[in-house]
Image (spheres, rainbow, N blue to C red):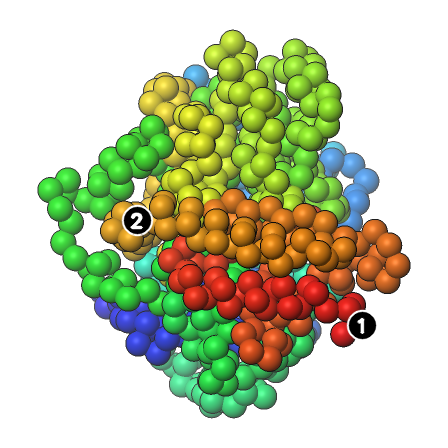
Amino acid sequence: MQSLPSAIETLESMLREQEPNLLRLYLNPHVAQACFCLDRYVRTTWADPSGRAAGGGEEFQSFLANGLDEALGGAIKLVRYNRGAVDGIRVGLVLDPADRLVGFADWDLTDGRRVEFLPGVRVIGRRGFGEVAERLRSGDFDGVVIDPLVLVTGDDGLLDTHAEAIGELVRRHKPAVVTCVDRESLARLRGGARGVLREVVPDVVVFDESFAGRAVPFGAFTARRSMFAAWNRMGKSTFHSTTFQPNTVSTRHFMNVMAATDPGFFRRHADELLAIADNLTRRGEAFRRYYNPSLYRVIRTAGFETADVRAVGSSVVVNGRPVLDFVSGVACSLRGHNPSGYVEALTSPVGGLGSPQAELRDRLRVLTGLGNVLPAVSGGTAVENALKAALVARFPRRHVLALRAGFGGKTLFSLTGTANPSYKERIGPLFAEVHYVDPFAPDARVQIDTLLDRHDCAAVQIELIQSVGGVRRIPEPLVRHLDEGRKRRGYLLIVDEVQTGLYRTGPFSQSRVFGLTPDVMLLGKGTSDMMVPFSLTLYSDEVAESLADRGAGLVETIRGHYGYELGYRTVLNALRAAEELGLAGRVAEAGSRFEQALRAGLAPLKGVSDVRVFGLLIAIELDARGGPRRWLRKRLGASYLLAMLRHERSPVLAGFCQYEPNTLKFTPPLNVSPEDIDRACETIIDVLGRPLPE
């Protein structure tokens, strides 16, 4: 068996070169190279019946996800968005003869009943393949609109056995075709293998974790640039996104694995790959064409279009000039960029508990009261894991209560907890049994009780501080009411701590502030330590018992999809480092220093509406109500952020809240120094104090 490159070596190279990770403004050569390779793979593997390359010669653009499930969900969204509304019942039919997508759209309970997660998506695994093939032949699907048709490699022979029925379905329904490939199946196709996977030319190709050796999270979906055009427009560039996207570790390791496993392809394109690495113009062009033209424009505007970018601690150094990174991958950083001793700790022997998973589980039980752990590769997949567990554990209850201005993610199922309708247009059907309440409404409690009286809810999903929705804490009486009601009403309380967990606000979690032990807790962002993409779903022993009784196999399936050893070790090392650094107290002190400086410096400014500080989760709300400010609206915050980034003495990289672009957001590393806090506050106060025309 061929030996694959070590992910540890990839990480060591990143640390040695101080290469940025999770920095969206980085004109990343590995991202550009990876997407270039995906374009070439698709266009040189498939041809239409006339012999033309897939896409008719058009270039292919890629979205880089964190795994097969995330990438396939994104591909379905892209197809649906482009196709728009259809007449009739729409079904995305997934033919999965190797059972690689078990649990993606639904789950079979131990009593034979089925829990549906994604309406409009039907996954046909090995057991039902013969039956569905007969239905395809007989025309049983004529009453629905099959779109897209997804072909999943892994048992290509079974697909070929039913090639005639699949071909007839394609001719009759004319669906967009999505083909999901692993490294081995792509190699067979490129080696000349015949069959249905070659004859049915895909519109979208999904690449799975095997292209990064299953050592680090990786996935991608690749489609013609004309399909991506709708998402490349202003205001739509983040319509689909996931935590940790893009990142250096996954794309750099993808390139290392590709060079080792497909040396012929690598040699054939060596000149282009070298040019992307060494020539800034070629790199930018590849980044724009094959990855993300909108992000490329932002990078140019910010002045980060350079090869001279390093990242260490609290700063990124651009052309020799330090810039304080107070975005930190949006609350991902505990110890800053490229933390010292990271790889040494990662490879150190495990203590007496026998495995990093066991030690992590025990530490988290002490910190949260929850000792059962499901791995995830993003905040979105952590949310999906939580919702799947809740619907299975509380079956036949199907309803979910969530809060307006909350954010669950943008993957197909995590959108359940995302109230903002702008992220859901043209991609339905989505999970429908969800109800939203504004937690700040005067009658919020009455609305919640009315909904809970009317529906048997399986889960109530909340963020104690709504980070995307403006960095606002949910009123404590409402939280107490939801906590007290779960025993009486039987729902599970899911608390999303993706941004607030891992000491971001001072204590380990906001749940601790409320003295709350939820049924399910989500952790993300900081779990990566700005290095390996990883998130967690924690749940109680009572939920674990219900899952073992009703949904046997669900936990094992999820762990099989996302259980990266490097991920577990990264979170464990982050917890150890947090303990050694005393981050709980340190973050509280840093937050207090921020708050005092900002309130004193910004108080006289009429253009600032509010300052909200929760440890090192900080928001400054700008007044966008009158005059030119009202006219600028969404661009008001961006104007000030750009001025901070271009500040003469101490440039600062900051972000904004997606739901409120006029609310600036600061999430510095948790070990940020007092000196860096003072420098950042001086810049913030200086820029916000300037007349708007400046």
User: How many numbered discs, if any?
Assistant: 2
Q: Name which residue lies at 86% across and 62% down.
A: 628
Q: Which residue is mark 1?
A: 693
Q: Name which residue lies at 40% across and 62% down.
A: 673
Kindly state the secondary structure of the residue where label 2 is placed. Answer: loop
Q: Is residue 414 left or right of residue 100?
A: right
Q: Name which residue lies at 54% across and 74% down.
A: 650
Displayed quadrant of residue 671: bottom left
Q: Could you tell me if residue 390 is visible in this image?
A: yes
In terms of depth relative to the viewer, which is nearer, 200 or 432?
A: 432
Kindly give the residue lying farthest to the right in the view shown: 627
Residue 147 position within the rendered picture, expressed as x and y whole percent measured from the top left = 68, 47
Q: CA distance from mark 2 to mark 1?
A: 44 Å
Quadrant (top left/top right/bottom left/bottom right) for the C terminus: bottom right
Q: Is residue 520 left or right of residue 263?
A: right
Q: Is residue 277 left or right of residue 608?
A: left
Q: Could you tell me if residue 258 is visible in this image?
A: no
Q: Is residue 413 left or right of residue 643?
A: left
Q: Which mark is residue 582?
A: 2
In terms of depth relative to the viewer, which is nearer, 372 or 266?
A: 372
